[in-house]
Amino acid sequence: MTRQDVLEQTKKVIYDCFPDMADMDLQEDSVINTETAIDSMGFVLVICKLEALFDVRIPERQWKKLQTLGDVVDAIYKRIK
Amino acid sequence: MRTRKKRNTEVATVRFDSFAHLLSHYAETSADAPALRFEDRTLSYAELYERVQIRAGELKAGGRTCLGLLCDGSLDNVIELFAANLAGMQLVMLDASLDDEILKSLIRYTDVDALWGDEDSCEELSLALMAGVKDGGGKILFFTSGTTERSKAVVLTDHSLCQSAYNGSAKLPLSADDTLLCLLPLGHVFGFVCGLLWGLSCGACVALGRGPRHYLDDCDFYKPTAVSVVPMLLGFLLKMRCINSELKLVLVGAGDCQQAMLSAAAAMGLRVSFGYGLTETSSGVAISVGDDPYAMEICPDDTITLAEDGEILIQAPTCMMQGYYKRPDATSQVLRNGVLHTGDLGAFDANGRLHITGRKKDILVLPDGTKIFLPEYESALMQALGHTELAVTLRGERPVLVYSGEAEAADIGEKLRAMMRSLPRGQQLSDILITDQPLPRTATGKIKRWELQQKVGLL
């Protein structure tokens, strides 16, 4: 699986969790917290779904460091490689 | 000054003087009853007390005096905190999700000489360890919510926390047949008292949540009958339909709860109670027990009065903090003659029940229960941006920056990126609003928070 695959699937999970964001063009540097209206509970939901999808585990202490979409993709990609 | 007497609706419950008293009592009277569950492990009250005593002996032999606990809510975490208390150590409850640099600052401030937590974190943070304390026995330090490196540590004791748990259980008693789900961080006093100590004080079983990634399935896994939550978490559980059929009682604290959420909870047959209290009062001093969750009865040990301007003043002789750690100046600003000046605004209804009506202080209370201390937060923003005409307010329950002057929101966001990364997610700015209008201010230059909030709400 390439990093691009992870990026696309991550975006799909976010769009699935938050249908209101369907018309939003998420970029790698989109700061998820400020540009996408994903609050802390929503973020938990996204991470849980991504962990299940990719069968990875991102330590909870790392979660707060995942600010942009790219940060999330990197955290997953690093763990499935 | 208006005063209301407490209604005499208390239920007789056991009052414990200390953690040792609580643990030894149930180890004797309910030895085989389940005390704690974590994942697939269960400890009876007798086993819990035995494990705590053994660990207390080890800690005592170690000779350390002040333990910093990186709270992860695990079974071992709970055993360690009780053991350290029984060993006569000062306990400092640290939020493991905080940035390392903030944690180091808090460790230095509170004289921590030993750490408990995951190995990697302890190794990194051990660089900040101090020489310990001489008179820390029984003291348990919690940081005010919305923790930053300049946060104040509130000095509580196992005695004050036990009295607070008694206050809660007198109003909302649990039985040995109940399972209380502990989802909130133990490093926050509401999570500690209402997620853990409330259940243990009643001899109930406390199921320790398995962390945020299990918010979705902890109810199904543990089948709790009661749970303590902050409003945002309740909304999440309801929205995701992860409430189990056995759950009957939800205690909500540390923030405002929208009516729609209450209606959704009621539709599921849940009884919702609100609790009001502060870290400084070892958690709750008023709890709603009737049909109206917004109408809170004052707890047995506490007296609440209202100042002329509506500020809630609390006398809680059994639960009050000893003070802010090494901050007598800050203590005397809020605690005068045994009366805590909360900065919250309230009113009594005809039945003497307390209703929270607003905030007097420059504080934003977020739906996840944390607080933003605006002068401190805005000062950091001003420093990062080199600009003083700015203010922070709430829009849709999330903090937004209002920037008065010429600038691009994207540039401001970039300049603030490092600062935002260091903050808990809920406290990060959700938007930046640029205005060419001056900020609304009083004659003395203070920002008119209410007016600003109204204007932002219209944007």
Image (cartoon, coloured by chain):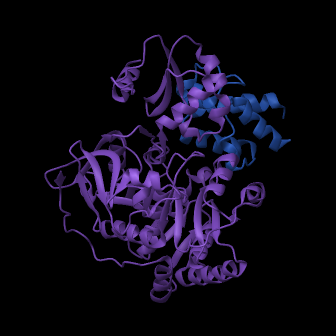
Chain colours: A blue, B purple
B456 with respect to B113 (left or right): left
Residue at image point 18% right, 62% down: B5
Residue B333: percent from the left, percent from the top?
39, 50
- Residue at position x 42%, y 60% from top? B247
| Of the pair B299 and B237, the residue shown nearer to us | B299
- The residue lying furthest to the right in this view is A81
Question: Does residue B251 lie above or below B203 as drawn?
Answer: above
Residue extending farthest front: B329
Front residue of B253/B16: it is B16
Q: Quadrant of the C terminus of chain B?
A: top left
Above or below for B160 versus B452? below
In this picture, is B34 found above or below B353? below
Residues B224 and B329: in front is B329
Q: Look at 33% across and 45% down and name the residue there.
A: B344
Q: Which x, y percent locates residue B285?
A: 33, 60
Q: Look at the image and tell me whether residue B248 can be seen.
A: no
Is residue B419 visible in the rendered image? The answer is yes
- Whether residue B128 sits left or right of residue B442 in the image: it is right
Left or right, residue B39 beside residue B296:
right
Residue A26 occupies quadrant: top right
